[in-house]
């Protein structure tokens, strides 16, 4: 089970990765997508929800009729996935020393 409170996506971003911040939630982008209108990127799920709630108005620039198919996966996905994996590895406790018999 994933601990949502302590996962990488719930943490504040270090300064060197602030450009990976979702424009909606302010956290590390999860499955980043970029809009075709303002070229900002957002978490895919959050952006879809925002578009549905606003009748397809972009929350970044107020462009009307932004369709879900207009959201494009962003190349930063690879970097975010690598960062997330390293973060998770650093959280794992060190293996205990082997038991001496």
Image: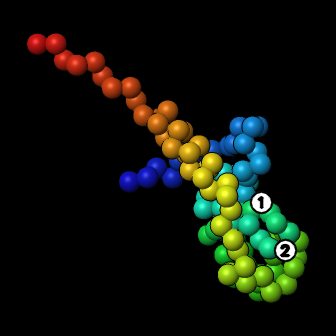
Give the class, few, some or many, for how many residues have Cα within 10 Å of label 2's Cα (few <14, many ≥20): some
The residue pinned by badge 2 equals 37
Residue 56, x across and y down, in percent: 77, 84
Query: In the image, is residue 31 above or below residue 27?
Result: below
Coordinates of residue 20 in the picture (x, y in percent): 72, 50
- The CA distance from mark 2 to mark 1 is 14 Å
Instruction: Determine crowd level at label 1: few under 14, some 14-19, many 20+ residues with C-alpha closer than 10 A.
Output: some
Q: Position of residue 98 (x, y in %)?
A: 22, 19
Q: Residue drawn 11% across and 13% down?
A: 101
Q: How many marks?
A: 2
Residue 46 coordinates in the image, percent (x, y): 66, 68
Is residue 79 found left or right of 26 in the rendered image? left
Residue 9 in sight from this viewpoint: no
Q: Quadrant of the N terminus?
A: bottom left
Q: Which mark is residue 23?
A: 1
Please identify the residue farthest to the top as the structure is shown.
100
Nearer to me, 30 or 79: 79
Q: Mark 2 or mark 1: which comes first in sequence?
A: 1
Q: Quadrant of residue 45?
A: bottom right
């Amino acid at each position: 089970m994933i601990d949502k409170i302590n996962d990488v996506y719930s943490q504040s971003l270090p300064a060197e990765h602030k450009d990976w911040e979702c424009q909606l939630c302010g956290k590390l982008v999860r499955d980043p997508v970029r809009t075709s209108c303002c070229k900002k990127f957002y978490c895919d799920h959050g952006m879809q929800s925002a578009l549905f709630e606003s009748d397809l108005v972009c929350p970044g620039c107020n462009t009307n009729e932004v369709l879900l198919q207009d959201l494009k996966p962003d190349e930063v996905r690879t970097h975010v996935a690598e960062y997330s994996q390293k973060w998770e590895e650093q959280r794992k406790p060190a293996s205990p020393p082997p038991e001496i018999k």
